Structures are given as C-alpha cells and as structure tokens.
Amino acid sequence: MDENVAEFLRRSILKIPLGEMKTILSAWNFLSEDQLQTVNLRQRKEFLAQEIILMCEEKCASVDDMALLDIVYTQVHRHQKLWNVFEMSKEPGEDVDLFDMKQFQSSFKKILQRALKNVTVSFKVDGKNAVWIRIAWGTQYSQPNQYKPTFVVYYPQTPYAFISSCRLKSTVPLLHQALKVATKHHQIVQLDLRSRHLDSLKAIVFREYDQTFENHNSTVPLQEGSLGLNMSLDSNIIHENMEEKERIHRVTQDTFGAYPQPQLEFAQYKLETKFKSDISGGILADRKEPLRCLIKFSSPHLLEALKSLAPAGIADAPLSPLLTCIPKKKMNYFKIRDK
Amino acid sequence: MSVLRPMDKLPDLNRATVLLVGTQDALLQKLAESMLQEQCASELRVHLANSLPLPSNVNRPRIDLIVFVINLHSQYSLRNVEECLSHVDSSFFLGKVCFLATGAGRESHCSVHQNTVIKLAHTYRSPLLFCDLEVESFRVTMAQRLVRMLQICAGHVPGISAVNLLSLLRRSDSPPSKEL
C-alpha cells in the first residue's frame, strides 16, 4: 500500500469519533466481519489507526477504497458541509431517458478524467437510491488532493443535484459539464437555496415536507390546548383574546401547515429598493438612489422559528410572504428590487 | 364598550380583578400564575389580553388595575401597548394603570430604549416597574408587588387609595414636568 494512501486512511480514522467507529467501519464494508471483531476500540486513536492500516495493507487497499470510507464518513456527518442545490433541465420535447447507473458512472468519470487526467472519482449508492459522488481534484501535472474533495448527491431520474461547497472555483464548470452530460440534461442552474441539512433541502425541492397536507382537513374545529399554549386550568385566569388567538393559529396553520418544517439555518435578503415610509420628511424619504442593505435571519431551525413568531406574540399574523415563501419558492437567498 | 372605564360597574364582594396586557402570552400566563400563588385575603381574578379593546360580547367584572407589559426586546410589543392606551378611559390613569418593562437584563437584545418607556410612563403619569419576567425569582417578587397594588386599587386596603399610591410611587428624581 502506498504511503499516501496509508496517510489518507490514518487521517480518515482520526476524524471519526470513537463512538461511531464501529458503525462507519462496517458501513464501509471493506474489512471482513472477523477483522472488525478483532479491532480493539479501547485504545488510543493513533494505535487504532495503525492497527487498521495494517489490516488494509494485507488486503492491498487502494485510494478508491479509502475514498469510499470518506464517503461513508460524509454520509454520517453530512451536516458538516454546506450544500448547494442545482436544478437541471432538458430541451422541451425531449424524451425521458431510462437511467442506467453503470452508464452514468462511467460517463461522469470519463469526462472528468479526460479533462484533468489526475482525478479520483468514487461512487456509492445509499439506501434511498441517491448516488453519492466524491471527487478529489488534481490537475494535469499533480496528484489529486484527497483532503479537499467535492461531494455530489444526485437522485437518479430527478433534475436535482446537491453539491457541497467547494473552494476550488476553477473546477466548478467542469463538474457541471460532467453532471449535465452524464444525466443527459442540457442546462444546469444553481438555485438560491443553501443549507447544512441535506435532508431538508431534499424535502424542499421534492416537496416532501407537505405530503400530509393533502389529507389535512382544515374545517376540523380547534381542540383545547392545540393553540400551542398550555392553557392553565385555573379558572381565575381568563384569556380575553381567544378568538384572535384562534385566528392566529388558523393563519399560521394555513401558511405553514401542520407538519414539521424542513430545517434551514439562514435566509438572506438583499434589498435594493427605494426607501418607503409612512412618516414623510425623513432624511431617507427623498433619496433617488435605492437603499442598499442586507438582512440576514439565522436560527438553528429557521422555518420553525418563523412559524412560532405569531403564536408567541412576537409578530403579527400573517407574516410577510417574503418570509413564508421560502419552501415554496425553493429559495433562501433573495434579491429585492423595485419593479 | 370600546373604551375601558374603571367605574362603570359595581365591584364584586371581596374580589380584585387585574388585566394584564401584552403581546407575549407565555410571559403573561407565567406572571398570572405567580400572582395567583400569592397569599392574599382578596379573591383574585387575572384577565390576560393581547390588545385592547377587549371583545364586547362577554360579561366581565370591574377591572381594578391594568398592567401593560412591554418587552424591551420587541418594538412590536411597545407599539401594541401604545395603540392599546387609546382605548383606556382617562380616569384609569388616576392610579389604576402601571407599566411593566421586561427584558432590561439582557441589554444586547434590547431594541426599545429604556428612556422610551420611561417617557411613555411619564406621559401617562403612571408608575413604571422593571422586572425580568423570564427569571422566576424576579417574577415572584413582581407578582407579590402587583398583588399588593391590586388590593389597594380594588379598595381592599383600608386607609390608602389608588391615587395615594400613585403619589407614593412617583419618581422623586423627575417631578411631573410641563413640557411632556
């Protein structure tokens, strides 16, 4: 086994938390069951890495095997990457092709290798039929850098691909080209949708989050305690605005639905509009140029946070459509201009 | 009944009713619970409202004290209170209104300046109390204080009236000035 491969493996092992070592190694499916049994997890990670390197040397492991381990690790730690969403489209009137996994993989790999010569491309199909692609970039004259790979998650026969943010900007057009050709699409555009939660992005673009909405009957009368507040049973506390509360609950339910929201961490609004105000005579009122500003909302769970604004009494219901349209428009980066 | 008046109903025997007005239900609810846990000779009723005017289709007892809760973290809560004030009859401001500003503890979160609420309370000649309602011990103390005020406003404490109390609670450092 090559020295570089051993080092790559060592670094990969050191990255994995001890608690997840067993599951990741068995998901990797490279070491045999017997070998996994003999791995001593009760030692320092450096020794553990050494032990695994020895095992892999016996089996003559290659860079490709190590790349698969990296994919398994990334599948478990997918939230550590920032994912971008890309939408591909076909020419109008074009037939839907049947997807052949083998053909996809070979043509994708061929395009990248033809252009760069030195590139490591690895594929792994996960349990939900998505293809995980890991690309370690090199150039014509240098070996691929295994430590700054790009990950692509593609769901066959859909026009969507999720690509992890990549620092090597020069490789982006090539990657798009390869995806386009391998999936037989004509165009690829980046959506203004980014998040660390790959599954939520997937739920948004495939509209999986509101599947329960169809059978949700909005005429069902509100039940006690369904307003999100634990109304006290104390008869000495009287809520005066019950009707208003029910209205807010209904409006929130109508805009967000009764299901849990997909998880996003931020939304960004870039404003380039004229300043409007009810109070005339402000210093900004007569400005001809647009007012430029950037507004960022961030939260561990942005959409749930927005959903609970009105019921908590922090904002008026209904909220501005700019805030509520995020999943519908598949966007969390907005640019607002005067019409 | 769009304007709330203090004296348009007869009082119930030994009952004191407070109206808490604020946008954040959860905080009001907690404050109400703390108030009801206080030992008190009068029978307490706590009404919670997000905004005024109150719905007119229900029969409610005479309201002895209105507490406007302003969250300093939210401009929205201040604006809401300002709008509500126009639905309160002026005779209420003879000691039966108080302002309660919460959230001053975490200054970095504040979007309403303390001076703004001080001015507001001053304009309406009503006492302003500061308390972080999120902190339980502070809330319990505040509940104690409000219950005591409520008893006075309801006329359950002999020898002192709401107007008396108002003059006692007036800030000594800022005598009522004419420019406001």
Image (tube, coloured by chain):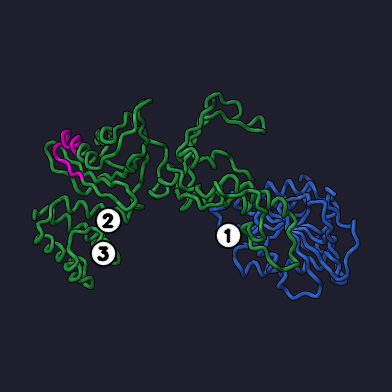
**SS state under label 1:** loop
* Type of amino acid under label 1: Gly
**SS state under label 2:** helix
The residue indicated by pointer 1 is: B105
Q: CA distance from mark 2 to mark 3?
A: 10 Å
**Does B24 sit above or below residue A251?**
below
The residue indicated by pointer 3 is: A21
Q: Colour of chain B?
A: blue
Q: Quadrant of residue B158?
A: bottom right
Residue A73, disc: 2
* Type of amino acid under label 3: Met
The answer to if A118 sits in the magenta stretch is yes
**Residue drawn at the location 28% of the way across and 63% of the way down:** A23
Write the start and end of the magenta stretch as one range: A109-121
Left or right of B15? Residue A174 is left
Q: Are marks 2 and 3 on the same chain?
A: yes
**Does B92 sit above or below residue A295?**
below
Image chain in green: A
**SS state under label 3:** helix
**Residue drawn at the location 83% of the way across and 48% of the way down:** B2
**Does A286 sit above or below residue B170?**
above
Left or right of A24? Residue A283 is right
The answer to the question of whether label 3 and label 1 lie on touching residues, with beta carbons closer than 8 A, is no
Q: Quadrant of the C terminus of chain B?
A: top right
**Main SS class of the magenta portion in the image:** helix
- Say which chain tag 1 marks: B
